[in-house]
Amino acid sequence: MVKKILMKKKEKFIKIYDLSVSKVLLDFINKELLPGTSITKNQFWKGFNDAVHYLSPKNKKLIETREKIQKSIDTFHLDRKGKKFNFNEYKVFLKKIDYLKKSGKNFKIQTKNVDKEISSICGPQLVCPVSNERFLLNAANARWVSLYDSLYGANIIPETKGALKGKTYNPIRGNKVITYARNLLDKYVPLKNKSWKNLDKIPNLINGKLNIELKNQKQFIGYRKSKNKLSSLLFINNNLHIDILFDQSGNLEINNPDGNQDPLKIHDIFLESAISTICDHEDSVAAVDADDKVLGYRNWLLLMKGSLNSKFKKNGKIILRKLNPDREYLSVKNKKIKLHGRSLLLNRNVGHLMTNPAILLKDGSECPEGILDAFITSSACLHDFKRKGNSRSNSIYIVKPKMHGPEECSFTNLIFEKVENVLKLKRNQILCGIMDEERRTSVNLKECIRILKKRVFFINTGFLDRTGDEIHTSMEIGPMVLKGEMKSTKWIKAYENNNVDVGLSCGFSGKAQIGKGMWAMPDLLNEMMEQKISHPLSGANCAWVPSPTAACIHALHYHEIDVFSKHKKIKKRKPANLDDIITIPIEHNHNWSQDEIEKELKNNAQGILGYVVRWVDQSVGCSKVPDINGIGLMEDRATCRISSQHIANWLYHGVCSKKQVLEIMKKMAKVVDYQNLKDRSMKDQEPYQPMSGSFEKSIAFKAACDLVFHGKYQPSGYTEPLLHFNRLMKKSV
């Protein structure tokens, strides 16, 4: 009710059919979204009106089912408090309340018209907030990324023996980059009886044949010429392209103002990097009203039209950034080759929980936000059908998060059917990515996929959200293990393996993506290089990265690992055990010291506050937030969910006290204030308002505390309801 009052003070609503639509949203749809499509205003609004009033009661019932199931689980644990936990009894109970579904016969997915970026190219995947046009352009253009730039700026090249990054180009570091890159060429495009390190002349090309012999000649795909001189050579490895750019004049090396120091005159090496990008309306944005939603919708629309651009100042100059064109080459047979110049863009809608005051239904209730997202983001894709700048197969890719079990997957299918009817699309033209990040989906993943077998193009695991739900679901049974120990628990290993096992058994290999989660430390790419190879080794044909540079570095893992060969081996292993997945990560005999408890609380509190203050005060849904040790972490709502649920769990079970937590929250607020006031990236935001100046008046501090002290009572442990409420409060002030 408060949410509505706040909105009504600011918004003008227009009556259309049974809907009250914010004028901001109405104007966007009528004047920007629909013109240029075959869908009239009347067709859209009548269709949407009928669909949303049909779907909303079903949406509400599903949320009520979540609450009912959670109450049943809470009661089960409360009734057995003080007794030894009986696992078999627990498993029987989960089946009885329909939490665990009976697994049906084996089947294969039937998804059609999937672009090759999804089906046959394994590589990094970016996730980018749809509200930030510069980030979106960077992500879309990250299909091709400079290896030289990436290596030069990353900690993969140590700053030892004179190899400092510095403020100006350092030729010592440049030489290390060149050596590293040559070694990679030897590894992934090896020459016969030679090394790339020993070449000192630009190769000749005669009648489409190189004067250097590759171990595998099929790796040579094509070339480009400039002023009748060879300017680039195109190779392929594990279905990923490598473009070596040559500088015949010798004075254009990337970063180097003094000319080309590479004896081979390699100007740069561009790697095919971010194969796909999720443009996110969910966890990485702060969208609480019509203005916020239209900002994201407009950016997505302009991406689909191919006209998104951004002007900004850099080093005193105005820079215009826009979408990269496709890349053109000549093949060995002198025929034209055109390669996609941009990442394949997917759209993550919001889940089923939240509503948005941008549209009010006939009973005065807010429109379910996920239904609104589906209609508008799909409508925007109609513009791409004509130009095929994104999907070459005219498919719409929507990633659907936070679904709880097969019934909610079925509801998503129903939403998409309604959208297809209104927009006059073919059945199953809207494809669906299933985020495996809620416990009831994990344990019924096969049946979730079965429901969407004609639409599914993607499944993935999300450690943070999944852990948040793990804690909340079993809140009543006891205190959870330390957050840092969670990754080594039995359930999470089984969960990660099960996602791959089920995906492969359902025929995902060569047809759909099996993904893994985010590397959250964009500055620690050497560590990423060492650790994230585990994702392609696990069978993931895509995995999340936080930046174009990280995408370029992670792409090296897919040059190293043939994921489709891995799939063949993984299929032969014993599938993950369901019993392991439902093993609850409680600490049975905890004897943590006060120092250990305080350290854990500080870590969690600092992460919550660092994220929430930017979300509530400045509408920043995703950014590089310093952790308690000053290491920049890419934070979104998932990290906030696990941290708030972890403290809430410890509070409930008496591991810590409310007084203790409040004191730590105040201490950490001072730390966060200091970090944000020193953070140069914050200069483009609204002036920062310290929480510690007046804790009682800080809406952000209150929101962070509410997430902790009322965390047990938040639906599924989600942070959205409290964050949305407090952001609206902040905007009204």
Image (cartoon, rainbow, N blue to C red):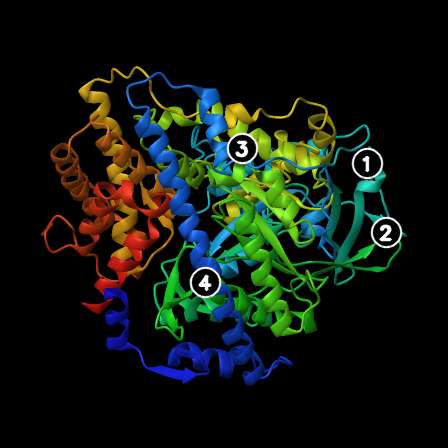
Label 4 sits on a secondary structure element that is: helix
**Pointer 3 or 1: first along the chain:** 1
Instruction: From the image, tell me which residue sits under label 3.
Output: 532
Residue drawn where x is 66% and y is 32% of the image = 560
Label 1 sits on a secondary structure element that is: loop
Where is 178 relative to 307, above or below? above
Where is 622 relative to 160, above or below? below
Q: Quadrant of the C terminus?
A: bottom left
- Say which quarter of the image contains residue 539: top right
- Say which quarter of the image contains residue 141: bottom right
Label 3 sits on a secondary structure element that is: loop
Tell me the mark number nearer the camera, choosing from 2 and 4.
4
The crowding category of the residue bearing disc 2, from other C-alpha atoms within 10 Å (few below 14, some 14 to 19, many at least 20), is some
Q: Nearer the viewer, residue 724 or 384?
A: 724
Tell me the mark number nearer the camera, choosing from 3 and 1.
3
Instruction: From the image, tell me which residue sits under label 1.
Output: 214
> Disc 4 marks which amino acid?
Pro
Instruction: From the image, tell me which residue sits under label 4.
Output: 57
> Disc 1 marks which amino acid?
Leu
Q: Nearer the viewer, residue 218 or 381?
A: 381
What's the distance in space between the residues labelled 2 and 4, CA to CA?
60 Å
Residue drawn where x is 27% and y is 59% of the image = 725
What's the distance in space between the residues labelled 2 and 3, CA to CA?
35 Å
**Pointer 3 or 4: first along the chain:** 4
What's the distance in space between the residues labelled 3 and 1, CA to CA?
29 Å
**Pointer 1 or 2: first along the chain:** 1
What's the distance in space between the residues labelled 1 and 2, CA to CA?
14 Å
